[in-house]
Image (cartoon, rainbow, N blue to C red):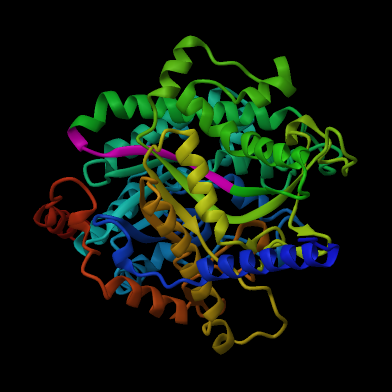
Amino acid sequence: MKVTVTQIFLLLLLSLVHSFAEQRSNEEEEVERSQFPSGFLFGAATSSYQIEGAVLEDGKSPNNWDVFCHIPGGIKNGDTGDIADDHYHQFLEDIEIIHSLGVNAYRFSISWSRVLPRGRLGEVNPKGVMFYSKIIDNLLLKGIEPYVTIYHHDHPQELEERFGAWLSPLMQEEFVHFAETCFENFGDRVKYWTTINEPNLLAEMAYLWGRYPPAHCSAPFGNCSSGNSDTEPLFVLHNMLLSHAKAANIYRHKYQLKQGGFIGIIANTLMCEPLRDIELDREAAKRALAFYIAWMLDPLVFGDYPPEMRQYHGNGLPRFTSEETKLLTQSLDFIGINHYTSLYAKDCIHSTCSSDGDRAIQGFVYLTGERDGVPIGERTGMRRFFIVPRGMEKIIEYVKERYNNMPMFVTENGYSPPEKQDEQEEDLVQDAKRIEFHKAYLAALARAIRNGADVRGYFIWSLMDNFEWVYGYNTRFGLYYVDRQTLRRTPKLSARWYANFLTNSGHNHVENAIPGSFKIKDAILTRLKTQKAEM
């Protein structure tokens, strides 16, 4: 039978339509709590600087973000974290709303400058320790597992001024001292520790693009007063990885056996797909993942940076000693995955690209959210964040395959709607699109688990609208709306959906989350009574 060009075209079109329909079917499939393993942690997440406020209260020192927020032009609308969501004064109310969701875990971070205002040069601030102890105790009384991040982008400004913070190896010992202070004061009740949130993102945003403090960059990535975008991110991440490894080593040898917890780190992840259906872009997509995700995870699993990076950076890429390699490869119990978006990747070795893609620090890859003017997924309130649920399944599969299916937690996943002028509270709380987002991403995650991925938890970013770094307060990821004038918390439609999703099943109790039962209620009540008497 003779096949015409028209028939071939129609067959191709039919194949594309079928593929698209299958993708839509996958991404719109219903998801239920029962599709996840017993003992799975479901939670919500925040970070200290983004919600606490009280920037100079009760002995806290200024941190790097306190200073950066007051530099004109640094933050959208001139917003600051001075008050944020006032969580420092309203944490008990916030724990009540966490409990109302029916979650069995809550992820939050410790403010370095609140606990150790001067780092190693100063004393531990007892009021800072008491604040986090109260949070931990009250969470546990509600049956909610504290999932603690030690460092989430904020450190005492003094460390920046004394030796350049993460640019210096001196920061490693400062971080280890901070981490051990946390283990000593909170480890009897905290079973899940993550040392550093998104070292790869911080290195990129603060030292490549210069958009986070200390705002270091160089052309073509930005116009900063100091910095070298081609080299500084490499040394900053190197120091953060060694800080993690040394802290984990102390935890292993001094605390883990008696405290019975687990320790990991959190990677910022995006999925990359080839921009063009050619081998060059397929290789570029793989290279982009290596230069962004494997850059921070390969050393922690295999003891060195990815071979793809060694190929293009050569001697410019820092090296680990044999002792450091040993520390690195023994430092992880699990990997935290923050995932929001997918992008297209274009090869810049054999193709013409913009100047920022045509650099070794970017793996000679240009990343974009559009192909021929069509976005990879529906747009959100963040310029480079698109709704691409299949990316969740793919990135989990990537980490599973590359790192021998090490246990994983999705430590952040969330949606911010495009900003609209004159939006009112009643519009913002009717967030059906956020519900669609989480249902689609959870369905993708459930597929990855069915395919064998060892994923043990999922945290929505964020519990409530908060200070979204350089984007200020108009970028809203929260399950709860926060009125900027009154700071009143109002549940959005998505909060009610999440509560229904969790409580319609019987698998959301904290006893399932860790081996054995963690029964310390009487001890916590005694501690809280003592704290109250001392106030």
Q: Is residue 243 left or right of residue 238?
A: left
- Look at 42% across and 29% down and name the residue there: 176
- Look at 35% across and 32% down and name the residue there: 180
Most common secondary structure along the magenta stretch: strand
The image shows residue 523 at horizontal and vertical percentages of 11, 52
Question: Viewer-proximal residue, 495 or 69?
Answer: 495
Question: Viewer-proximal residue, 378 or 471?
Answer: 378
Task: State whether residue 47 appears in this view.
Answer: no
The image shows residue 510 at horizontal and vertical percentages of 22, 58
The image shows residue 209 at horizontal and vertical percentages of 75, 44
Question: Viewer-proximal residue, 440 or 516?
Answer: 440
**Measured along the vertical axis of the image, is residue 71 above or below residue 99?**
above
Q: Is residue 348 magenta?
A: no
Tag count in the figure?
A: 0
Which range is magenta? 258-269
Q: Residue furthest top?
A: 322
Q: Quadrant of the C terminus?
A: bottom left
Q: Is residue 93 left or right of residue 16?
A: left
Task: State whether residue 19 appears in this view.
Answer: yes
State the image quarter where residue 34 is shown. Answer: bottom left
**Measured along the vertical axis of the image, is residue 362 above or below residue 436?**
above
**Measured along the vertical axis of the image, is residue 484 above or below residue 205?**
below
State the image quarter where residue 125 is shown. Answer: top left
Q: Quadrant of the N terminus?
A: bottom right
Q: Is residue 264 magenta?
A: yes
**Measured along the vertical axis of the image, is residue 278 above or below residue 450?**
above
The image shows residue 282 at horizontal and vertical percentages of 71, 41
